[in-house]
Image (cartoon, rainbow, N blue to C red):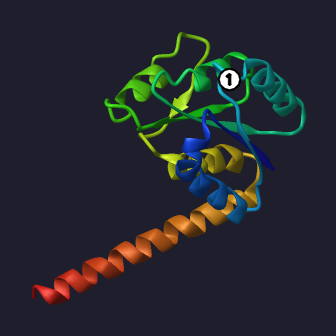
Amino acid sequence: MRVAIIMGSTSDMAKIEPAVDILKEYGVEVDVRCLSAHRAHAGLAAFVDEANNNGTEVIITAAGMAAALPGVVASMTVLPVIGVPLSGSVLDGMDALYSIVQMPSGIPVATVAINGGKNAAYLALQIMAIKHDDIKNKLLAYRKKMEEDAMKTNEEIVKKFS
């Protein structure tokens, strides 16, 4: 079980680390790289080629501003690519969001919320859960725990205002 995560700049690291942690909690091997689509295109192409051949099941990409990285990666693979638009410019990530969701037909990129690294990890896990029952069972248990916590909070609110 393997996921690749590619960020466009080291300034993106803090927004990606939670995704790495979540994936590792589920026993997924994670390959993390910092490869700009604009400044390191040859290295990016080599890494995507490696991911295409080493058992990687999903690629998460994180980029801000022009956010070309997710689309460029998607153009080089048929593996599922998840784009994480990042804030950082005067447009607070809207520029990156629009760049990632407006892919041409035939080259899709699944897109999560701005700075949504955690949900990118959970989406990657859901994709992998199609064939990995251990991941599926852990996700189901996690969802059950979230529900229990929400119901406990609700009970506390009811008590407080009754």
Q: Is residue 92 above or below residue 156?
A: above
Residue at position x 56%, y 20% in the image: 68
Residue at position x 34%, y 81% in the image: 152
Residue at position x 38%, y 33% in the image: 93
Relative to 140, is 88 on the left or the right? Answer: left
Mark 1 Cα within 10 Å, few/some/many (few <14, many 20+)? many
Q: Which residue is mark 1?
A: 73
Element class at badge 1 = helix
Quick one: which residue is furthest to the top in this view? 105
Q: Where in the figure is residue 40, as x and y percent of width and height?
A: 72, 23
- For badge 1, the amino acid type reads Val
The quadrant of the rendering that contains the C terminus is bottom left
Using the rendered view, name the quadrant where residue 45 is placed. Answer: top right
Q: In this orientation, which residue lies closer to the viewer: 116 or 122?
A: 116
Q: Where in the figure is residue 5, as x and y percent of width and height?
A: 68, 41
Q: Is residue 131 above or below residue 6?
A: below
Relative to 77, is 154 on the left or the right? Answer: left
Relative to 148, is 39 on the left or the right? Answer: right
Q: Where in the figure is residue 18, as x and y percent of width and height?
A: 57, 57
Q: In this orientation, which residue lies closer to the viewer: 149 or 137?
A: 149
Q: Where in the figure is residue 20, as x and y percent of width and height?
A: 66, 54
Quick one: which residue is furthest to the right in this view? 53
Q: Is residue 76 above or below residue 34?
A: above
